[in-house]
Image (cartoon, helix red, strand yellow):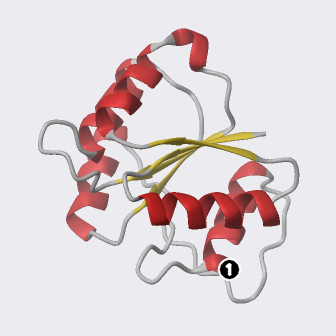
Amino acid sequence: MIIILVEDNPVNQSIMKKILESNVNNVLVKVIGNGEEAVKFFNNKANLHFNLIILDGNLGSKSINGPQVAEAIVKAEIDAPIALWTDDKVMIETMEEVFGRTLPHLDKSPINKTNIINVVKTILDPTTEPTTNRRMTY
């Protein structure tokens, strides 16, 4: 399975990649480091072979941030599960408006390994029973 991680912070990229590839079976994480690259990636139909998108809301770019990437995903009619990786309530609301639905989100500050693993496993395999420490926000 392939997970697309859209995240601009190199430290967070590394931590998230390690958590996912070490704790979720048969997963490869492809990291996209900024909004511009993400929009190009999602607009290229040859790239649309993945199982999950994890999208950071605050990509540190004034031109293309999380909501603009979300708009590109909607415009490209990508039919893949999406999890938001942000604790910014306004950003969550904005992106959910773009997608037209409530989305699961992963705890970012501080990074919560148990939350990340449980949310991702539940998205990729809805029959998975999460641990009791699960905190999934919809």
The quadrant of the picture occupied by the N terminus is top right
Image-based side of 125 in relation to 81, left or right: right
Query: Regarding mark 1 in the picture, which secondary structure is present there?
Result: helix
Furthest-left residue in view? 62
Q: Position of residue 12 (x, y in %)?
A: 48, 65
Residue at 57% over, 28% down: 79
Q: Which residue is mark 1?
A: 114
Residue at 68% over, 80% down: 114
* 136 versus 123 height, above or below: below
* 8 versus 4 height, above or below: below
* 132 versus 67 height, above or below: below
Q: Position of residue 6 (x, y in %)?
A: 45, 45
Residue at 69% over, 89% down: 133
Q: Which residue is nearer to you in this view: 76 or 61?
A: 61
Furthest-bottom residue in view? 133
Q: Position of residue 89 (x, y in %)?
A: 26, 69
Residue at 39% over, 59% down: 9
Amino acid found under the numbered disc labelled 1: Thr
User: Is residue 105 in sight in this rendering?
Assistant: no
How crowded pointer 1 is (Cα within 10 Å; few <14, some 14-19, many 20+) is rated as some
User: Is residue 134 in sight in this rendering?
Assistant: yes
Residue 127, by quadrant, is bottom right
Q: Position of residue 106 (x, y in %)?
A: 51, 67
* 117 versus 81 height, above or below: below
